[in-house]
Amino acid sequence: MADAAACVALDKAWPKGYYRLGAALMAVAEWPQAVAALETGAALAPGNKDMVQRLNEARRWSEDERERTVVQVAGGAAHASPRLLNSGTIQGQGHTC
């Protein structure tokens, strides 16, 4: 992640630096920060399909994390989003919580 942050620090107008930073943040489940980095990259390179795809993925994970937090605060699965299953798998994505 340090290398990606260094890329952004060296050239704030280079979209690939933001892509790398977003990917690194996603790898450590820092969803809001990943979304912010990828949004900046997408603004710099709006036609970059890989950037937009990764941004959408980070947004989904960020939203899923917010939903899990609401469930935990609310006291359990009785208030769970329909996307969350009892097994802890996010429906239709094959990811585990």
Image: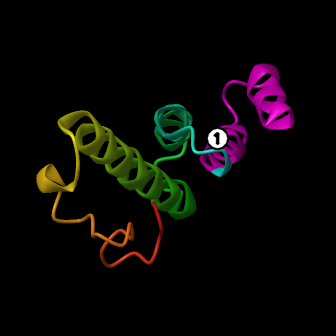
Residue visible at 54% across and 37% down?
44
Q: Quadrant of the C terminus?
A: bottom left
Which residue lies at the image location 64% right of the left edge and 41% below the top edge?
A: 25
Please, is residue 91 above or below residue 36 in the view?
below
Percent coordinates x, y for residue 33 in the rendering:
53, 31
Residue most toward the front?
75
Residue range in magenta is 1-26
Task: Mark 1: give few (<14), some (14-19) or many (20+) Cα within 10 Å.
Answer: many
Q: Nearer the viewer, residue 11 or 23?
A: 23
How far from the left and from the top, in percent, is residue 11?
A: 76, 25
Q: Is residue 67 above or below residue 50?
A: above
Determine the residue positioned at 56% across, 39% down: 41
- Is 16 displayed left or right of 39 in the figure? right
Between 85 and 92, the one lying in front of the other is 85
Q: Circle 1 — which element?
A: helix
> Residue beneath label 1, please?
25
Reply above or below: 75 against 57: above
Specify the quadrant of the image occupied by residue 24. Answer: top right
Tell me where residue 78 sits by quadrant: bottom left
Give the x, y percent position of residue 55. 47, 51
Q: Is residue 7 magenta?
A: yes
> Would residue 24 be found to the left or right of residue 62 on screen?
right
> Is residue 5 within the magenta segment?
yes
Query: Does the magenta stretch mainly form a helix, a strand or a loop?
Result: helix
- Which residue sits at x=13%, y=50%? 79
Q: Amino acid at mark 1?
A: Leu
Q: Quadrant of the N terminus?
A: top right
Percent position (x, y) of residue 93? 39, 75
Q: How many labels, in total?
A: 1
Q: Is residue 93 left or right of residue 26?
A: left
Q: Report whether 82 appears left or right of 86.
A: left
* Res 57 quadrant in image: bottom left
